[in-house]
Amino acid sequence: MSDPWARYRASVEPTEESIERVRARLAASEIPDPELRLLASPRPSAEARVRARLERARPPTLVRPVLLLAAPLAAAAALFVALAQPAPARQLSADLSAETPATFALTAEVGLSYTGAGAVSGTERAPVIRWQAGTLRLDIAPDRGIALAVETPEAHVEVVGTVFEVARSTLGTRVDVMRGQVAVRCADDGERRLLSAGGSRTCLPTRAAGLLVRARTLDEAGAPSADVIDALDRGLALSPDEPLRSELEALRINALAEAGREAEARDAADRFLARAGGARRDEVTRIAARLALRAEGCTATVALLDGIPPEQRVASDEIARADCLATTDPAKARAALEAALALSPTDALSDRIRARLARP
Amino acid sequence: MTPAVPIAHLVTAAREGSLDARARLVEAWLPIVLRWCTCLGGPAVDPEDAAHDILLLALTRIDRLRDADAFPAWLFGMTRRVLADRRRSAWVRRWLPGPLAELVDPADGPARRHERDETSARVQEHLDRLPAALREVLVLCDVEERTGDEAAVLLGVPLGTVKSRLRTARARFAQIARADGLGPSGERR
């Protein structure tokens, strides 16, 4: 067993005892019965009452005779215009929605493969696909005069005869070109760029909320902190209102601290704490306390942690306080440990706190 | 290493409320989820706690899963999200100073981490230093010895992406291991 991977593999194999502990906890947990969800469905009588109220809320009936006259007139006018014009290209209209890969021929010249959701409009010669989420791959016969466009909230992609893929996710819209050439215009900078085979471009979300989601996705995927911070800076540059601003700032402070940019993180945390309340205040206070501990020591750390209301503290807040107060105020340190014991999320941590409390 | 049980049938029955099917799903997937939590959770996450929460969440939401065959990928996605949440909320444990740091260091937590030898602990440390995307592919392919296709399904990415991530992950891991003096034999130099 000299191979590190073999040793590691053996060491992470769950033991029977460990499996049994989780199994026992699951058995003791309350798992909602799926049928209970049905209780939340409205009863037919309730639905009928809502329909009746909507019926009463409709516009006065005087409007209806006008609509009844206008509709045939409009239809006759449309028919006249249609007959007077040369036959238009066939209109396309379809919703695309598939959880597993789906493939079909949109027209004789355009093949689609997709997983996700969107809608097709336009004409046979100039289809327009509004893509909402997922991956869309298009195969367009070259030199047939097909002018296809794909639109997402972040990107406008134009193509004449090629194979390419559009993937829309929480990170934005990514375009990959397999064959031919496409023009991509990102909504955030408006710049139109030509992509050739093998090329790709990602258009970032254009709204602060979208950029926050991008940052969170990058963070969860373990992307470099610089990319996370870039998304957050772009979101903050859009001057979002609360609580979005606080969400962006709090995640940015965390990312700066994770990236080792501690002075910037501390400055940003101080500005945040001077300005904002809300749900992220305690989290930012903890980050500031951590940074203060490294830069200034225990006094500043305890002052910050004391700013978190006792009912909002978690076990690690109290443990940090206890650690800092151990030499200067043993009584307070002990009280903090007792508070930590009450807040302890795991049995293992509780046991260790008890052992610590038992020491003189 | 995927359990040899008709997953789609079990999932369908579990969605319909079969307690037996739920129990069999837990039986089949608990060890796998526990291993994912141990390998991917990092030092701040208690694997048993996380595995419990993931399976509870899965059983609670199983009626929302439309494609029964997609259960493994769905469960892995859930694992990934729960672990990410836990890492974020437990970050404060990483910086506690002084003698009390031991109180919140789950290095010898209930998942028998204390039984690991030094080499295994170092492999875990190096894994924890990799970005999540690389760590995941390395655990699925090199620890659990899944094929590229299996990993692609679980991760929800194309096979080519799995291959390129795996190349990068192995190179990055080797670089970290070399810098730390963990030789190819697994012994400390």
Image (spheres, rainbow, N blue to C red):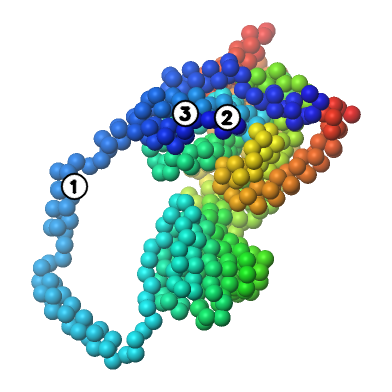
Q: Residue at x 10, y 68 (%)?
A: A61
Q: Is there CB contact under 8 Å for labels 1 and 3?
A: no
Left or right relative to A322: residue A22: left
Q: Secondary structure at mark 3?
A: helix
Q: Secondary structure at mark 2?
A: helix
Amino acid under disc 1: Glu
Quarter of the image where the C terminus of chain B is located: top right
Amino acid under disc 2: Ile
Q: Which residue is mark 3?
A: B25
Q: Is there CB contact under 8 Å for labels 3 and 2?
A: no
Determine which quarter of the picture holds residue A324.
top right
Determine which quarter of the picture holds residue A7.
top right
Q: Which residue is mark 2?
A: B32
Label 1 vs label 2, nearer the camera: 2
| Label 1 to label 2: alpha-carbon separation | 45 Å
Amino acid under disc 3: Leu
Residue B152 visible, this orientation: yes
Q: Residues within 10 Å of mark 2 (few under 14, many from 20)?
A: many
Establish if A203 lies above or below A32.
below
Q: Which callout, 3 or 2, points at the residue further toward the start of the chain?
A: 3
Q: Position of residue A26 (x, y in %)?
A: 46, 22
Q: Position of residue A344 (x, y in %)?
A: 55, 21
Q: Residue at x 49, y 71 (%)?
A: A110
Residue A298 visible, this orientation: no
